[in-house]
Amino acid sequence: MTERQTPQAPRTHRALVLRRERLTPHMIRVVFGGDGLRDFATGPYTDSYVKLLFPAPGVAYPQPFDLAAVRRDLPREQWPRTRTYTVRNWDPAALELTIDFVHHGDTGLAGPWAATARPGDELHLAGPGGAYAPDPTADWHLLIGDESALPAIATALAALPAGAPARVFLEVGGPEEEQKLDSPGSVEITWLDRPADAPGAALVAAVTAAEFPTGRVHAFLHGEAHFVRELRRHLRHDRGLGREQLSVSGYWRRGKDEDGWQASKPEWNRRIEEEQERERP
């Protein structure tokens, strides 16, 4: 008889809501704090992300919370549901962690939670992970995404070297969703209104038609999986970017919630890897 294997649980942190702010009609900022974040650290990446752990309704978890014990002792349907979010800001001196949530009404899990979050509300989180930061040796920077990538893009812009050239393409729901993005770099931002029936179409059209500066570019391409894959092909095949010049990730996929997307993402990644193997000289 084979003993059931339990996935290794990542380290978790207990976070308390300090305050909440609506940045735009569909973007909510929640600032977390508390001593449970004392050992939290983001490292060098501007796309640092955490896994927020939302309790399953009616389930009593061990106290203090122990994700390893939860995964060992409880059936999978009682495990907390996870949602992945970019760290918008981390202030280790103040122990304040800022997360921006896209909110589309009562649908979904994390957005509705953020809309009703109150000071003192508790949430556990795992992480952080991350893999990208702007290359200070690049001649210029290209950042492409939708609302889901906006926090990571904003953090990357704030980390650019002084005067570093950057072209940014951001697709959002409309002018009311645009945000002021500060940067020490020399930044040109193109805001695009998302077609209701074709997420990513405006981004694809704008990027493929754009005239790129000369020199070596470091590119960040994150957001809805369909446009990410299409623009990755464009950047690799039509623009001639090397794989080492690209940070690419499908944050979500239309028609799927995060549970469904995470289940199918390995297949998506496999296809990307196959494309990369075919691209090898």
Image: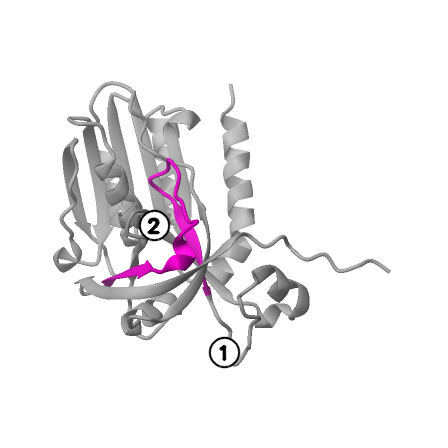
- Using the rendered image of the protein, determine whether residue 229 is visible from the camera's viewpoint: no
Residue bearing the label numbered 2 = 87
- Compared to 96, does 108 lie above or below? below
Q: Is residue 195 above or below residue 236?
A: below
From this viewpoint, which residue is outermost toward the bottom?
Answer: 58
Residue type at mark 1: give it: Pro
In this view, the residue in front, 280 or 80, is 80
Q: In which quarter of the image is the N terminus?
A: bottom right
Q: What stretch is highlighted in magenta?
A: 27-53
Q: Residue at left 23%, top 32%?
A: 160
* Marks 2 and 1, how far apart at CA: 26 Å
Element at label 1: loop
Residue behind mark 1: 57
Rendering colour mode: one colour
Nearest the eye: 10 or 148 = 10
Taking the spot 38% from the left edge, 44% from the top edge, the residue there is 48
Q: Does the magenta stretch include residue 141?
A: no
268 is higher (above) or lower (below) than 245:
below
Instruction: Report the number of numbered marks.
Output: 2
Give the structural element (helix, strand or loop) at label 2: strand
Label number found at residue 181 = none
- Report x, y in % for residue 13: 46, 57
Name the one closer to the observer, 87 or 121. 121
